[in-house]
Amino acid sequence: MKVTICGSIAFFKEMQEMKSKLEGLGHDVRMPPSELKDDSGKDIPITEYYKLRKATTNNESWIWNRKEEAMRMHFDKVMWSDVILVLNYDKNNVKDYIGGNTFLEMGLAMHLKKKIYLLNPIPETSCKEEILGMKPVIINNNLSEIS
């Protein structure tokens, strides 16, 4: 199957590990890029970009141009895939965290009638009803359930 991994960039290391596991099971896998270009056009690691983004308060910063580009690129990956796998680990004292961007990707997948898999249960969040309406399959870290 064609699988797109979704989740917070804070989980980038876990995404890389998951990609390897899924490929070992025979899946074709896409995930966020490992690098983005900074304001001078130099490639920087996605984890460095994430830290810069979290620290940026300037609404006119180049950071938001890259954020838009990254979002559009990942939406394309969701459209390409058969299914998405959401890596929803604990983050910021939220169990099974699903952030805004991942929620958007899940909404796109639902609209495109793609199956949505959650690695862990649905978090207790203000958008829990919407996530329930997307009818994700909770796999509890059992990758063999992706079919």
Image (tube, rainbow, N blue to C red):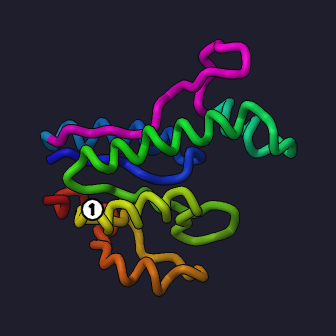
| Mark 1 Cα shell of 10 Å, populated few (<14), some (14-19), many (≥20) | few
Residue extending furthest toward the front: 60
**Residue located 53% across and 47% down the image:** 11
Can you say whether 103 is above or below 8 in the image? below
**Residue located 27% across and 62% down the image:** 112
Q: Magenta residues, as a range?
A: 27-46
Q: Position of residue 33 (x, y in %)?
A: 47, 31
**Residue located 43% across and 58% down the image:** 105
Residue extending furthest toward the right: 57
How many numbered marks have been drawn onto this rendered protein structure? 1
Q: Quadrant of residue 48?
A: top right
Q: Position of residue 29 (x, y in %)?
A: 27, 39
What type is the residue that disc 1 sits on? Leu
Is residue 40 toward the left or the right of residue 70 in the image? right
Q: Position of residue 96 (x, y in %)?
A: 51, 68
Can you say whether 7 is above or below 66 in the image? below
**Residue located 73% across and 31% down the image:** 62
Q: Quadrant of the C terminus?
A: bottom left
Residue at the spot of label 1: 112
Element at badge 1? loop
Residue 36 magenta? yes
